[in-house]
Image: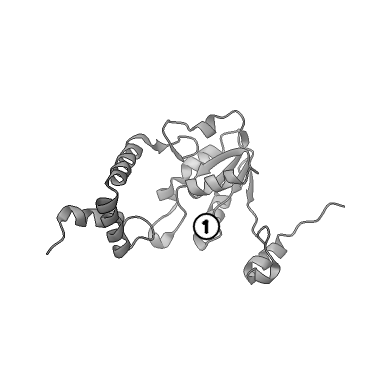
């Protein structure tokens, strides 16, 4: 007996989610239809509402329901600092540290030539215009320490070279609460290279 075409379409649609293969998508589809139809309706309505109302903030490029998000409009933020991150999730993680009070720019990806993602696909000219607006004094590059994140950080630092703005990169090293015995050699080596003097 063949699967109804609408069910096949739902299973295929669920496969677009990261880490979801054919079996997981099938389980999710059957769960929603068989055990949680109200949840399925809520999910469909929420997804449709998000698609209809969310756009990119004109200043930081994150998702927003207005042209400029509330964070960019806040007078409590330090407009002289601009932290560049890959995704809105990365921005949320930075906020959770409660150690940064500046503004952000979300690249919405990272350079990956093998996947056909270059500077044009990420619209990095918008970031350049934002960083050189005369208000920003320091750009903090907080891309991930993956090959693509490193390539993106290098490209951004070159792009901002000789501009009237300081450029820094977040450090990496031993995690808080980490014991040296369990830290990988690469992380430990980087922590050693990025050591700083203690106050006398």
Question: Which x, y percent locates residue 45?
Answer: 30, 39
Q: Of 8 and 66, which appears nearest the observer?
A: 8
Instruction: Determine the residue located farthest toward the right in the rendered image.
Output: 200
Answer left or right for 199 relative to 36: right
> Disc 1 marks which residue?
149
Determine which quarter of the picture holds residue 4.
bottom left
Determine which quarter of the picture holds residue 57.
top left
**Residue at screen point 32% across, 55% down:** 16
**Quadrant of the drawing holding the N terminus:** bottom left
Determine which quarter of the picture holds residue 80.
top right
Question: Which x, y percent locates residue 169?
Answer: 62, 52
> Around disc 1, counting alpha carbons within 10 Å, would you say few (fewer than 14), some (14 to 19), or many (20 or more)?
many
Answer left or right for 139 relative to 23: right
Instruction: Determine the residue located farthest toward the front in the rendered image.
Output: 35
Q: Is residue 24 above or below residue 143?
A: below
Question: Which x, y percent locates residue 119?
Answer: 45, 51
Does any portion of residue 85 appear in the rendered image? no
Q: What number of labels is visible?
A: 1
Label 1 element class? helix
**Residue at screen point 13% across, 62% down:** 2
Does any portion of residue 37 appear in the rendered image? yes
- Visual colour scheme: one colour
Q: Of 125 and 93, which appears nearest the observer?
A: 93
Q: Is residue 45 above or below residue 29?
A: above
**Residue at screen point 51% across, 38% down:** 129
Question: Which x, y percent locates residue 32?
Answer: 28, 51
**Residue at screen point 84% across, 51% down:** 199
Q: Of 148 and 131, which appears nearest the observer?
A: 148
Answer left or right for 6 relative to 38: left
């Amino acid at each position: 007996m063949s699967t109804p075409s609408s069910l096949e379409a739902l299973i295929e649609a669920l496969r677009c989610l990261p880490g979801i293969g054919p079996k997981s998508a099938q389980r999710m589809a059957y769960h929603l239809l068989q055990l949680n139809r109200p949840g399925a309706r809520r999910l469909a309505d929420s997804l449709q509402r998000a698609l209809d109302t969310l756009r990119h903030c004109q200043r930081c490029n994150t998702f927003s329901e207005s042209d400029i998000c509330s964070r960019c409009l806040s007078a409590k933020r330090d407009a002289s600092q601009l932290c560049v991150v890959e995704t809105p999730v990365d921005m949320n993680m930075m906020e959770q540290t409660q150690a940064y009070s500046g503004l952000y720019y979300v690249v919405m990806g990272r350079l990956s030539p093998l996947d056909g993602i270059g500077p044009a696909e990420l619209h990095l000219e918008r970031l350049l215009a934002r960083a050189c607006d005369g208000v920003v004094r320091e750009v903090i590059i907080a891309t991930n320490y993956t090959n693509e994140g490193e390539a993106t950080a290098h490209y951004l630092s070159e792009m901002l070279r000789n501009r009237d703005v300081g450029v820094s990169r977040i450090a990496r090293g031993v995690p808080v609460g980490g014991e040296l015995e369990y830290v990988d050699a690469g992380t430990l080596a980087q922590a050693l290279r990025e050591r700083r003097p203690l106050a006398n």
